[in-house]
Image (tube, helix red, strand yellow):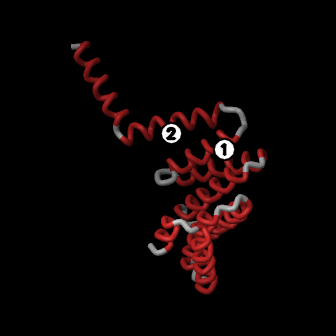
Amino acid sequence: FTILFYLLCTVVTAQVHKSPVGQMAINIDSLTNIVNTAKEDTAKVNAYHMLGSFIAGTDALAALAYCKKGAALGKKLDYKKGIAVCMLTASYCSGLLNNLNSSTSYIDSAIFYYKIINKPDLIALCYKNRAENKQKLGKLKQALNDCDTSMYYTEISNRKSAKKSLYK
């Protein structure tokens, strides 16, 4: 019986690790290990961002904390791309927590850094997200201005995927 039980557990474990949920659990564990043990470098900033992205849907508050830590480390390292992605994800997490003013503030920071590193497609996404926040806050004129700005950056990015997301 013991051998049969061991074999059954082995098969079930193997199946779980093949599943997307099992893989995500492994990724979360690996990323948690990285942020807790790795030296302070850009890889650690990226790990904070990915960890925040992975758990945002299930624990937005913890995800926001990871994004803030990633952004702070990115600032310490002058890693602008890392700061931008962490701020964009922090904005998403704040939106999930229904804190639209904070979400907008994080988007503004992301826009600032995406402009520095010249990422017009991501600037367009940020302005689109900010327009949605402004609309929800009842600031319709500002929302329309952000839509126009998003359209501008979408056009100069010349990326079809950016254009498609704008029209959704």
* Residue type highlighted by circle 2: Ile
Q: Secondary structure at mark 2?
A: helix
Dot 1: few (<14), some (14–19), or many (≥20) neighbours within 10 Å? many
Q: Tell me where residue 136 appears, x and y as whole percent.
A: 54, 77
133 up-or-down from 65: above or below: below
Give the position of the C terminus as an image quadrant.
bottom left
Q: Is residue 62 left or right of residue 106?
A: left
* Residue type highlighted by circle 1: Val
Q: Quadrant of residue 126?
A: bottom right
The residue depicted at 57 percent of the width and 67 percent of the height is 125
The residue depicted at 77 percent of the width and 49 percent of the height is 78
Q: Tell me where residue 151 appears, x and y as whole percent.
A: 58, 77
57 up-or-down from 28: above or below: below
| Label disc, if present, on residue 31 of the rendered structure | none
41 up-or-down from 117: above or below: above
Q: Is residue 99 left or right of residue 161?
A: right
Q: Nearer the viewer, residue 60 or 108?
A: 108
The span from disc 2 to disc 1 (Cα, nearest Å) is: 15 Å
Query: Which residue lies under the disc numbered 1?
Result: 45
For discs 2 and 1, the disc positioned in front in the rendered view: 1
Give the position of the N terminus as an image quadrant.
top left
Q: Nearer the viewer, residue 45 or 162?
A: 162
| Label disc, if present, on residue 28 of the rendered structure | 2
Q: Quadrant of residue 106?
A: bottom right
Q: Tell me where residue 49 appears, x and y as whole percent.
A: 60, 48
